Image (tube, coloured by chain):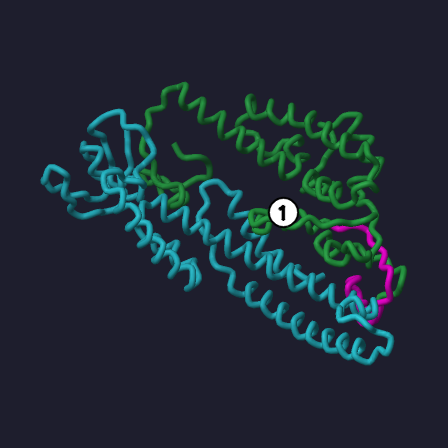
Chain colours: A cyan, B green
Amino acid sequence: MYGDEALKLVREAKRAQAAAGSTLSVYNETVVRNVIKELQILADEQSRVVAVIQHAVDEDPYNETDDVMAAAPAAYRAQFLLHHAGIERNKRCLLAYHAARIDKVRALTWELGGAGLPPDVARRCSPAEARFAEKYAELLTSFKGVHGSIDLTAAPVPPKELYICVRVVKDCGEIFTETGQSLVLKANTQHFVRRTDVERLITQGYLVHVE
Amino acid sequence: MSWTARPLTDVDYYDLDGILAEQQCLPATFQVHIPGMGYLDGTEENEDILEGTKIPLPVWLIDTLNTDHEMLVETDLPKALTEAVLRHLRASASKVNLQALCPYYFMVAEKLQHMAEGTLPITTGDTIAQAFQDRLKAVLDHTQTRLEEHTSEFVQGLDMVERDILKRGQDASLQVKRWAMRTPARIRRAPALGMGDADVYGRPARGGRQG
């Protein structure tokens, strides 16, 4: 049946959506290419059918209308519609797959506060998606700049205390706090620091907020 | 059945569930002879589709073949909407395994109800709506009392819409629990980053929700 290959993409996107805490899966270039091939075959067939219909209608001495489809014999109409349905279905599946992935890229960019995608995620994007991610991050950053006094992408957790205890998971090197002091964040060390200095690093996974 | 398609909104077009739901097949009888398209029945036996050929066709294909102007195929109810199943639903709705019958049971029923208006028995819509309500009581009960249950027999029998409701309900209940126990509001690592390689103490990641 037409569109079986394209359905694989939709199922993949659906699975990614449903899994809790999921991130972007690898761009399925192979299947996408196959779907495009199927589309090409259907489109070529369709041109042939259209030519046959036009010829049949032109040759028909009893035809008075300009409506080619209405004048065509039912069998040809059926062929046309079958191919048309196949083309539209494949197109819809392709678009939905790509749209779902782009939505995910957008969501990731917001969650990470306008930073670009982490390298392991960027690796799984297609080149077009990677370009989109870059541009979108730029867009988000300039949007945040408009509302300078509020950080739109801050962690949506109401602050309970001014200083928090964090443990370093990934080495961050040296950072500068709001008060001007510098902190060396080496892996597996624990620090008692001002919340506002480290919120971003926690969201991005470099530190963990411990009790 | 007569058939009227409803135009898709933007949101519907990209909806992954909508795409998967339309893959449901109905028994279809062709009303015209179509040369050269015999391969649609999945075998290599027939060159042409003859008038009266019966092939199960997906809803999306029937949608294009049947228009206001003409019906190229006559369709029949899928097994999931026959009187036998409806009787089961009237008797004890929660016990029916909808996932096995049709994973997108309610979406398909709704689509056919709209398209085959006047041909489905009036009571079908009422029966299914009532069944949904009855099952919903059981689903909501699960969201309050069985927060970790994902694979029991009851859950296996739910269709995709019901599963979605169950999952959201369970998530909501868990959040309420956490709030009630005054779990300190910790800033979390962005869920978009996935499970990550290891937790704070270097233990490898397991499945499950983050703190």
Quarter of the image that includes the C terminus of chain B: top left
x, y percent for residue A82: 74, 64
Furthest-front residue in view? A64
* Image quadrant in which you'd find residue A177: top left
Mark 1, residue position: B18
Label 1: state its secondary structure.
helix
In the rendered image, the residue lying farthest to the left is A180
When the figure is inspected, residue B103 is found, relative to residue A37, above or below; the finding is: above
Chain part drawn in magenta = B25-48
Is B33 left, or right, of A176 in this rendering? right
Determine if residue B45 is in view: no
Residue B163 in view of the camera: yes
> Does B168 appear in magenta?
no
Amino acid under disc 1: Gly
Compared across the picture, whether A168 is left or right of A20 comes to left
Provide residue B191's location: percent of width, then percent of height: 40, 41
Q: What residue is shown at x 31% (from left), y 28% (from top)?
A: A158
Residue B169 relative to residue A65: left or right = left
Q: Is residue B133 left or right of residue B175?
A: right
In magenta stretch: residue B46: yes
Residue B9 % position (x, y): 59, 48
Point out the residue furthest to the right here. Answer: B52
Residue B44 position (above or below residue B111): below
Chain of the residue where label 1 is placed in the rendered structure: B
Foreground: A143 or A114? Answer: A143
Quarter location, residue B167: top right
| Residue nearest the viewer, comparing B181 with B93 | B93
